[in-house]
């Protein structure tokens, strides 16, 4: 691992380091060559932090041992993929705020898969949502479509499980680090995906998930994918955030309609009204993938 990657890895473990901090540091010094000897006054000048904040951040940064961090990653069968690595997905570099690095657990070759479909929906998705996915996902797997989702309970978990049951591959993008899989009820599913697919996070393994990280991780879920399928979503739903990211990224949004009396149909039907493609079967998605 080169020196730039070593320092970038340490930045991911450093408390209070923001995406903007890293952007400004890399803009100032593309290879982070001066970071090891940077005084707090210079850090403050570059990032706009107070000198006191800069001093605390640098103290934490210099207290971190690269050898210890690297050893911990190896023990957990994880790797760190910096943004300039050939394994880093090119499509994520087009995001307004791409992760500076990805922590990966599992088959990293899956990142080169051409046809990925994000599947998102309600955490309280019910039997209707599960049956809809059961009728769609196996046919997608037969056509080598890789399923991407966020490991949340409900529709996310259903889509991961059905993809694996059908003999396919799945990528789970999580909030927080690998040491704090959330929700707890999906820990076994996460472990299975790490063995049969791939788990990704932009956060170091020791980072506990925070509320703001869940909508932030949705940009990666959509960013990896050729399309986003929404199955059951309330009027105010995190799934709509993912769909919004997809629309901003020029990615197709697909939606499974539901009963007009069901509250989990409201968000889906609003997407359809805004131009999302209605999905009744896998062919409705496969036809769009073929056209690209």
Image: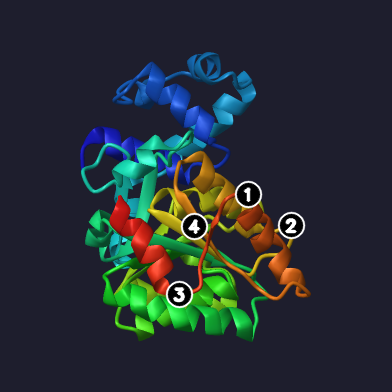
| Disc with the residue nearer the chain's start (4 vs 3) | 4
Would you place residue 40 above or below residue 96 in this image?
above
User: Residue 288's spot in the image, x, y percent?
Assistant: 37, 57
Label 4 – label 2 distance at C-alpha? 31 Å
Label 1 – label 3 distance at C-alpha? 20 Å
Q: Is residue 161 visible?
A: no
Residue that mark 1 sits on: 274
Label 2: state its secondary structure: loop
Looking at the image, is mark 4 or mark 3 nearer the viewer? 3
| Disc with the residue nearer the chain's start (4 vs 2) | 4
Label 1 – label 2 distance at C-alpha? 15 Å
The foreground one among 260 and 226 is 260
Label 3 – label 2 distance at C-alpha? 25 Å
Residue that mark 4 sits on: 206
Residue that mark 3 sits on: 281
User: Residue 272's spot in the image, x, y percent?
Assistant: 61, 57
**Res 106 quadrant in image:** bottom left
User: Residue 90's spot in the image, x, y percent?
Assistant: 30, 42
The foreground one among 67 and 99 is 99
Q: Which residue sits at x=32%, y=75%?
A: 141
**Res 76 quadrant in image:** bottom left
Residue that mark 2 sits on: 236
Q: Is residue 55 visible?
A: yes
Would you place residue 188 above or below residue 83 in this image?
below
Looking at the image, is mark 1 or mark 2 nearer the viewer? 1
| Disc with the residue nearer the chain's start (3 vs 2) | 2
Q: Which residue sits at x=29%, y=25%?
A: 31
Circle 4/circle 3 CB separation < 8 Å:
no
Circle 4/circle 2 CB separation < 8 Å:
no
């Amino acid at each position: 691992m080169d020196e730039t990657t070593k320092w970038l890895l340490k930045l991911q473990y450093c408390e209070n380091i923001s995406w903007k901090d890293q952007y400004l540091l890399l803009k100032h010094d593309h290879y982070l060559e001066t970071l090891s000897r940077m005084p707090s006054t210079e850090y403050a000048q570059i990032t706009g932090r107070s000198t006191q904040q800069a001093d605390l951040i640098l103290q934490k940064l210099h207290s971190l041992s690269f050898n210890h961090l690297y050893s911990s990653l190896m023990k957990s069968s994880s790797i760190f993929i910096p943004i300039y690595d050939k394994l880093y997905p090119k499509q994520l570099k087009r995001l307004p705020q791409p992760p500076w690095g990805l922590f990966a657990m599992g088959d990293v070759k899956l990142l080169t898969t051409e046809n990925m479909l994000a599947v998102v929906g309600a955490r309280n998705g019910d039997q209707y949502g599960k049956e809809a996915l059961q009728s769609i996902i196996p046919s997608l797997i037969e056509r080598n479509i890789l399923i991407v989702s966020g490991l949340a309970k409900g529709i996310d978990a259903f889509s991961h499980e059905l993809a694996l049951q059908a003999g396919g591959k799945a990528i789970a993008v999580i909030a927080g680090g690998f040491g704090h899989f959330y929700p707890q009820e999906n820990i076994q599913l996460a472990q299975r995906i790490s063995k049969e697919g791939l788990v990704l996070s932009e956060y170091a393994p020791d980072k506990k998930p925070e509320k703001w990280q869940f909508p932030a991780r949705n940009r990666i879920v959509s960013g990896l994918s050729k399309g986003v399928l929404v199955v059951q979503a309330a009027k105010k739903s995190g799934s709509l955030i993912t769909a919004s990211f997809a629309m901003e990224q020029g990615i197709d949004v697909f939606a499974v309609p539901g009963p007009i009396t069901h509250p989990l149909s409201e968000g889906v039907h609003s997407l359809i009204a805004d131009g999302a493609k209605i999905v009744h079967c896998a062919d409705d998605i496969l036809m769009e993938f073929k056209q690209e």
